[in-house]
Image: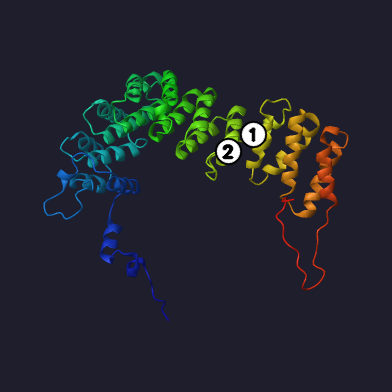
Amino acid sequence: MRRKRVTLLRSPRNGISPEKVRALSRCKLSINALLLLFCFLIIQPLGRAQDAVPQGNTADSNVPQVSERTRAFLTHSWDEATFREGLAIIQDQNETDASRGLALEVLHSRRLKMPAEERKQLLEESTTMAKSGTEPALLSAQAIRVMSSMALTMEELGEASDLEAKRESAFLLDAAQDQHRDIQVRASAVRALGMLKVAGASPVLRSLLSDKSNLNRPEIARCTCLALQQVDGASAVTPIKEILNTTQDSSIFGTAAFALGQIKVTESMAALVETDSRFAGSGSCDAVLVDMEDVILATLSNPNDPNLIPAISATRHLWRDGQRERYIPLLRTLITTAPLAARKAALERLIEAAGQLKFEAEKRELSAVLPAIDNQPQLDKYAQRIQERLSATLLTPSGPQAQVPSVKKGAN
């Protein structure tokens, strides 16, 4: 008996007719182009989008339109003429803004596959568009991003020197600070300064972060935290920490936490631990602290490190397999070598960590700690707590009807 073949084309539940599915299957759009087309169809309408609606088109006039010429460009197999056609669309002021932006993005997505001469042309065209002053804000912001990306790519490929890659630094610095420019353009310029690691950008970026009007303004504060981290490295901890401590915007807090997580030094680790309780439940600090194991363990290995107590607290965020086995021995060492306050913090953390184990495993772990504190009178209360826990017994039902109330581990 032949098995009946069922395909997507026969399924009425997907909401697409078989004819449309067949048409899509024949389409030669690349995955990148499809994604870009989708993005342009859901963003806010650009300047001349309404003028591009063909006569008799019943589509929503608020949706940005992509011209037939651009659609043909997207569906055409890539050949020697494709780059020139894309460049012509970008330069054509009669094209819709959505079409020009889409063509720019498609060419940019192929930057590693095109010849050096074409990369140079794309850099020049995106630079012209970025600096023109007459382009719509979204196109200008996009052009700045493409310009900086192309400059960095050409530097990495040996087609441009560091100086040549940063030749538009003055323009970017001016655009980032100019409050008369659209906020998307300013944000794009800030990102470019970070991407290109423009050394002279540090004062500008620090000024943007210290400006109280930007404290809860995610369009500026988020990209500036990231850019400053890229430009200044470890010296960016203090201004980013200030944002982490004071912003009332959870998205800015999350980005500042991420930026500090990329600066893998004890000061950034301590800042993340100290602000972990802000925006409870966001998980922003936890997400980066788990990747700072090397910093945390190095700090635990130095009993005189000024950030030792934050490092002890940071072990709560080391939840991945194998991390516990690496930090527990260091905590045990600290209870005999560290200053008193750190010894107490290490003991609290060891008791807490043991309480998360099964009962017998908890007792074994606490038994290993007790001998180290028996001769330390300042830690008598911890020794007493451990002794009480070791003398405890696990109740078991005495009969078929007996029940033992369940208590969360470590609740007592």
Q: Label 2 near label 1: C-beta < 8 Å? A: no
Q: Give the position of the N terminus as an image quadrant.
A: bottom left
Residue 151: percent from left, percent from top:
36, 27
Q: Is residue 175 left or right of residue 270?
A: left
At 35% from the left and 49% from the top, the residue drawn is 31
Residue at mark 1 to residue at mark 2: CA–CA distance:
19 Å
Name of the residue lying farthest toward the bottom: 1
Amino acid of disc 1: Asp
Q: Which residue is mark 2?
A: 276
Q: Neighbour class for label 2 at 10 Å: few (<14), some, many (≥20)?
A: many
Residue 390: percent from left, percent from top:
84, 49
At 32% from the left and 69% from the top, the residue drawn is 12
Q: Earlier in the sequence, mark 1 or mark 2?
A: 2
Q: Which mark is residue 339?
A: none
Residue 175: percent from left, percent from top:
32, 24
Q: Is residue 312 left or right of residue 136?
A: right
Q: Which mark is residue 294?
A: 1
State whether residue 250 is above or below residue 298: below
At 34% from the left and 39% from the top, the residue drawn is 109
Residue 341: percent from left, percent from top:
74, 30
Amino acid of disc 2: Asp
Q: Give the number of marks.
A: 2
Q: Neighbour class for label 1 at 10 Å: few (<14), some, many (≥20)?
A: few
Q: State which mark lies toward you, 1 or 2.
A: 2
At 26% from the left and 59% from the top, the residue drawn is 23
Q: Nearer the viewer, residue 221 or 83?
A: 221
Q: Nearer the viewer, residue 369 or 319?
A: 369
Q: Quadrant of residue 304?
A: top right
Q: Say if residue 177 shows up in the picture.
A: yes
